[in-house]
Amino acid sequence: MTVAAPAEAAALDPAGRREPSTGRLQLEALTKRFTGRAGVVTAVESVTLDVMPGEFITLLGPSGCGKTTTLRMVAGFEDATSGRILLDGKAIDNMPPQRRPMAMVFQSYALFPHMTVAENISYGLRLQRRTRADIAESMRMAVTSMNLVGLENRSPHELSGGQQQRVALARALVVQPKVLLFDEPLSNLDAKLRDAMRAEIRRIQKMFGITSIYVTHDQDEAMSMSDRIVVMNKGKVEQAATPGEIYARPASVFVADFIGRANFVETVPEGVADGRAMVTVLGRRLSVPAHPTVASGSMDAYLMVRPETVTLSPVTDGGTGMGVVLRSTFHGPSIDYEVETAGGTITVTESGKDSREALVEGTNVDVTIAPDRAYLLNRE
């Protein structure tokens, strides 16, 4: 585990929160290239990011997008090919991992099996040559905040997966790092425990106010935990924004498709002005928000429509409607429909409905799109 050097450890206020003036992390045109038998491969290309003190940033993307390589460069485990890493305005590119005021929580927890919980947590403090009284007080804070009281003398193999994860987090926090790094820390937990640990990590991070960089491929984790999400693809940043912005106003078709579920309906924009455009979709003229790069008359535009922003109304008395229900799937809190339309098959989600209210296959329906919740994008 990477631990903070004693001289670099930032102070906490009396309530145990990080002072907001420390922990600003800046990546400037960070690039990493690997040379192998296949030639030169660019894993990360010109990533520029400004992370403010206390901010929780998630690097999100598919396997091979460069998110883990970026994290490893920040930690000092990989050397950047070019670019700079600044912490509180000072370059740390040439600083070895053990001298960077950071700590990392690993996917595998990386606990020492021959040490007790207390010994694992205090390991970094002992490396920093802290006094016995300082170690005892820091340990008390860590054990209490992570709900580990009474487990101090147990070995890692005597703990549940969630308890092991909390020990790993306590060990990282106790050295008072300026930046906390997470490398897919919840991927080994079952779904229910993963949900609980998301909330726990976010609670602890807010309480201590530590700048955090979190790597995951799980969209739900990113959406529920982050102040901002950095969506990466093929080594580049596609978009860096709040979860709400990324979901409602994605920068590209890739982002829209990767975050949540989306329908993409081909259309031709007209009268693009002031961030809106007129489109004809499923026989209706709609005024919709548009990406700044969309131009009038473009033949390469998609209207992104989230499934939950579409309403279905059964057509009675022999009417044909705009769509036909192909399939319905009951999920408990919601019902998903696949609906065949003139613009292709779309997915629709209705919440709060009983299974007995589900529309049967073959039902003719009118399809209503909420225009302000759609978004017009250029096709890639």
Image (cartoon, rainbow, N blue to C red):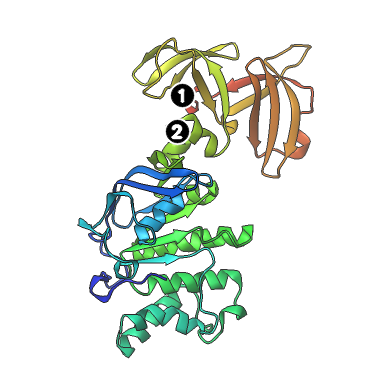
**Residue 202 visible somewhere in the drawing:** no
**In the figure, is residue 339 to the left or right of 60?**
right
Outermost residue, front side: 37
- Where does label 2 land, which residue? 250
Badge 2 amino acid: Pro
- Where does label 1 land, which residue? 377
Question: Nearest the camera: 202 or 84?
Answer: 84
Q: Quadrant of residue 244?
A: top left
Spatial CA distance of label 1 from label 2 is 8 Å
**In the figure, is residue 128 to the left or right of 182?**
left
**In the figure, is residue 200 to the left or right of 29?**
right
In the rendering, at what x and y percent does residue 143 appear? 45, 78
Question: Nearest the camera: 172 or 40?
Answer: 40
In the rendering, at what x and y percent does residue 289 appear? 43, 23
**Residue 40 visible somewhere in the drawing:** yes
In the rendering, at what x and y percent does residue 197 appear? 53, 62
Image mark for residue 85: none
For the residue labelled by badge 1, is the local secondary structure a helix, a strand or a loop? strand
Badge 1 amino acid: Leu
**Residue drawn 49% across the image and 28% down it:** 373
Query: Who comes first in sequence, dot 1 or dot 2?
Result: 2
**How many other residues sit within 10 Å of disc 2, few (<14), some (14-19) or many (≥20)?**
many
Image quadrant in which the N terminus is located: bottom left
Q: Quadrant of residue 310?
A: top right
Total label count? 2
For the residue labelled by badge 2, is the local secondary structure a helix, a strand or a loop? loop
**Residue drawn 36% across the image and 23% down it:** 292
Question: Nearest the camera: 140 or 344?
Answer: 344
Work out whether 230 lies above or below 184.
above
Q: Verify CB contact (< 8 Å) between mark 1 and mark 2.
A: yes
Work out whether 284 lies above or below 351.
above
